[in-house]
Amino acid sequence: MQNSSMLNVYLTVDTELWPYSEGWPVTALSPDKTTFDEEIAACFYGKTSEGEFGLPFQIEQLNRYGLKATYFLEPLFADRAGSNHLADVVDLIQRNHQEVQLHLHTEWLSEIHDPTLPACFKQYMHQFTLDEQVALIAKGMRSLQAAGVKKLHAFRAGSYGANRDTLRAAAQNGLLFDSSYNPCYLGEDCKIDLDGQLLQPLRLEGIWELPITFFQDYPGHQRHAQLAACSAKEMETALLDAWRQGWFSFVIVLHSFELIKGRGAGRLSLSDRLNIKRFNHLCEFLSNHTDKFRTALFSELDPATIPEIKLPKMLRSRPHHTIRRYTEQIYSRFF
């Protein structure tokens, strides 16, 4: 039985590979490209001249502080780069007691020749028909299961590019949860149309939607709870305000490569000191407030325990915390 006074914090990590190739995916990769070693070293392992700050570093920190995270892992890359790399990432995550769920970037369709899938890439899931989306999610699930994931529960569309058909497609594939709804990306990217903004979980099209958390950082503007997009104090304030209001869930986003910068062919990436500091601070903050927050996994979430929260209030940043973020980010560009 869940403690109703606790806020469930979903630390979600979009884990994906991006090739070093100018014009991709509009221009397909050269047939001569047979290795993705540089991209894998950067995107998954966060290799820099100062050490690694990717998945192994993140997971070590999470486990050090007794925290759980969901790695939304993109598997379509493996059809081009090699299924062994996908299996290695699945093993790294699962043997360290974190979870894998499904993420899809349909840009990889430009590299895949599979008769069950659309022949051409489109950037967003919502650009495909319902049947095509059913097939895409089924393909992603098969790939992750072949790589060692026993059971999948949740989906997130690449670039939050879902619509209601995406939710129907996920439900038809037996998934229980989606976390593609991001109010800050509504319009061109995210097309999950609703009456009003979604702040807390809602059952929609046969699946539970757990929206990305956001807050108002200045009048008329919203910011989603992404590690690289928020100052430490903005994140802390939003978490505490959500807990005080009795929210059920708070969904935070980061990426497998969010703690490095300057990725590119023929050079080592650099560590992103600001984001590393924010990540360590967030882990320490959550660990120090286990009376208020529990990091939660989709695989452990019983849909029957999700309450109906009537008209929760939008979270709001404090002006001095937002000003601090702008100052930090200007400084980080030069140091």
Image (cartoon, grey):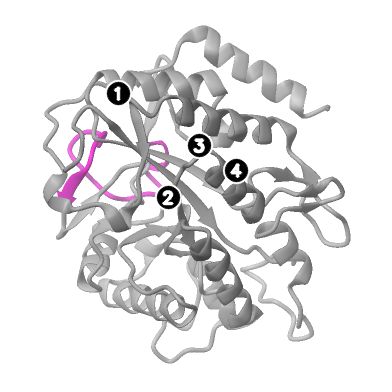
Question: What secondary structure is found at the residue carrying circle 3?
Answer: loop
Read off the magenta span: 183-203
Q: Which residue is mark 2?
A: 189
Q: Is residue 186 magenta?
A: yes
Q: Amino acid at mark 4?
A: Gln
Of pointers 1 and 2, the one earlier in the residue sequence: 2
- In the rendered structure, which amino acid carries the disc numbered 2? Asp
Name the chief secondary structure element in magenta: loop
Judging by the rendered image, the residue that carries numbered circle 1 is 243
Residue assigned mark 4: 61
Query: Which residue is found at the position 24% from the left and 29% from the top?
Result: 247
Q: Is residue 134 visible?
A: yes
> Height in image: 327 above or below 99?
above
Give x and y (percent) for residue 187.
37, 44
Q: Viewer-proximal residue, 226 or 4?
A: 4
Q: CA distance from mark 4 to mark 3?
A: 18 Å
Dot 3 alpha-carbon crowd within 10 angstroms: few under 14, some 14 to 19, many 20 or more? many
Number of marks in the rendered image: 4
Estimate the spatial distance between the alpha carbons at disc 1 and disc 2, rounded to whole Å.
29 Å
Q: On the picture, is 330 further left or further right than 13?
A: right
**Disc 4 vs disc 2: which is toward the camera?**
4
* SS at circle 1: helix
Instruction: For marks 4 and 1, give the CA distance.
Output: 24 Å
On screen, residue 176 versus residue 95, left or right, reads left
Mark 3 lies on residue: 226
